[in-house]
Amino acid sequence: MLTALAYKARVEARAAAFSTFAGLLLAVGLAFFTVSAWLALSAVLPTATVALIVGGVYFGLALVFFGIVALIRRKPVHVPPAARSTPMPEIIQAFVTGMAAGQGTAATRR
């Protein structure tokens, strides 16, 4: 039991370390892509326009990812259980009526 827990902790720690390293590499790669896009656009467009384009791309991506997070975190709507559809008073009344009819039939036979 304790060995399994220690193994699971090691696996989770390794996964966290690799995820952190992958995130760091992703950030470095994104920085290089941003610089290369800036240089490519600045050869054709004024610097202010390039800044607007790069900022707009990052802003749009951030909005998309916030939307994805909102969809993931959406809690399911709780639907209350349906009300009992058995009409108990009506069933009891029908049973009592049937019993009374049966007793009346039995009394007329005698």
Image (cartoon, rainbow, N blue to C red):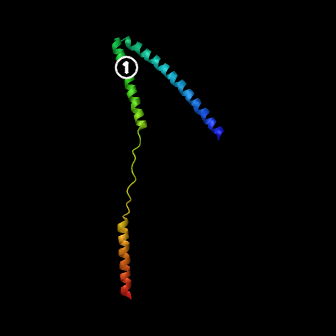
Q: Residue at x 34, y 13 (%)?
A: 48
71 shown above or below 83: above
> In this view of the protein, which residue sits in the foreground, 30 or 14?
14
> In this view of the protein, which residue sits in the foreground, 76 or 53?
76
84 shown above or below 44: below
Look at the image and tell me in which quarter the C terminus lies.
bottom left
Q: Residue at x 40, y 26 (%)?
A: 62
Q: Residue at x 37, y 70 (%)?
A: 92
Q: Is residue 8 left or right of residue 110?
A: right
Which residue is tagged 1? 55
Q: Position of residue 16 (x, y in %)?
A: 55, 29
Q: Position of residue 71 (x, y in %)?
A: 40, 36
Look at the image and tell me in which quarter the N terminus lies.
top right
> In this view of the protein, which residue sits in the foreground, 15 or 32?
15
**Residue type at numbered disc 1:** Gly
Q: Position of residue 5 (x, y in %)?
A: 62, 38
Q: Secondary structure at mark 1?
A: helix
Q: Position of residue 11 (x, y in %)?
A: 60, 33
Q: Is residue 33 left or right of residue 97?
A: right
